Image (cartoon, rainbow, N blue to C red):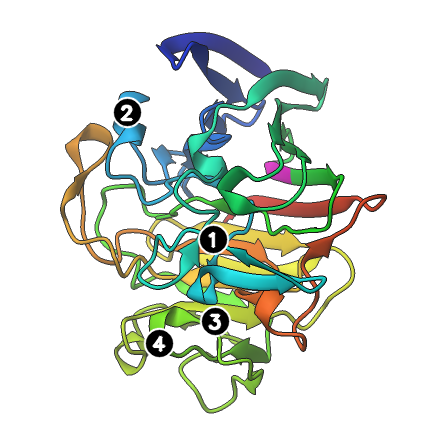
Amino acid sequence: MKIKEKTVAHYKGKEIKFFELENSQGIKMVLMNYGATMISLFLPDSKGDLADVTLGFDTFEEYLGNNPYFGATVGRYANRIGGGRFVLDGREYRLAKNDGENHLHGGIKGFDKVIWEGEVIGNSNSTGVNFSYLSPDGEENYPGNLNCQVGYLLTDNNELHISYVATTDKPTPINLSHHSYFNLGGQGKGDVLGHQVQIFASKYTPVGAGLIPTGEIREVEGTPFDFRQPKAIGERIAQVEGGYDHNFVLDSRGGLSLAVRVLEPTSGRLMELYTTQPGVQFYSGNFLDGTIRGKGGSLYQKYSGFCLEPQHFPDSPNHPNFPSAILRPGDTYRSLIILKFLTR
């Protein structure tokens, strides 16, 4: 296992650091303390050839511009909160409306735009970085001082463990997730419509205006949201207005379980996602429009990458029938994502 830490810039009086990791199988990744972000992930194909399978930028400075959360840690509440408001213990909280009339991924300055403290972790079989951040009471109008930790651990058996731990001194909504855009054929190598996706979910949460859940939990059977058997992303995407950007209600809840399997047929790269969360947001890169120039000068067009965001359901604070996303003093928020990388 190898890890190299280097300072690449100074921003707002703090060091911006890149952490370069490599396991014994040749998988490489780069992390950054700005946004607790995964910048790149190099995976072998079925012939052993490496390619970077995540969308993003070559330099730190580019992440300060037009950046749709490439590889970032999103919070304090990942996904959307309808109307930019919620009521908690009888008090109304109003949040930034940074996505039309709604609140998205923690607001104007979410966790993707803060500088985290980074500490190298690992042992003989794994290496990684633990990022920590104190979100102060009232940041983006959320209540409570929230102590957060996000750990990335790359193992020698080709797994990436992403763990989240948080505590608070006041009741607060919390929903932390990872926001990489994947293209298992290689970033900049066309669209992802041919990727075969299997989601272990028999239900999903339909959305209305602004992609806010209606509150209904609906069966996927007979709909273009039925990925219980592997289906190409592009096979039925035309039947979904705007493309996929929906929360799937996972069948196995309450423990770590297999949630999604994705195969890119040409390269043979296969990725499995395990999570402890009750849902996963599947996003097909609908809002990419060719205006963002990424790594190596790649222009990211519509459907250039897909996201899988393990999470509590969107807008949960406003839907009592959804699993609660409220963290209270004395309790600890814990979440785990495992990405397994294979070839076929």
Gap between marks 4 and 3, in whole Å? 29 Å
Residue in view at x 85 percent, y 43 percent: 330
Helix or strand or loop: what does disc 1 sit on? loop
Callout 1 amino acid: Leu
Helix or strand or loop: what does disc 3 sit on? loop
Callout 3 amino acid: Pro
The residue to which callout 1 is attached is 95
* In front: label 4 or label 3: 4
Residue in view at x 70 percent, y 56 percent: 326
Label 2 crowd (10 A; few <14 / some 14-19 / many >=20): some
Percent x, y for residue 117? 58, 19
Gap between marks 1 and 3, in whole Å? 38 Å
Q: Which mark is residue 58?
A: 2
Percent x, y for residue 201? 59, 74
Q: Earlier in the sequence, mark 1 or mark 4?
A: 1
Q: Earlier in the sequence, mark 4 or mark 3?
A: 4
* In front: label 1 or label 3: 1
Callout 2 amino acid: Asp
Gap between marks 2 and 4, in whole Å? 35 Å
* Vertical arrangement, residue 334 with respect to residue 115, above or below: below
Residue in view at x 51 percent, y 68 percent: 247
Helix or strand or loop: what does disc 2 sit on? loop
Callout 4 amino acid: Ala
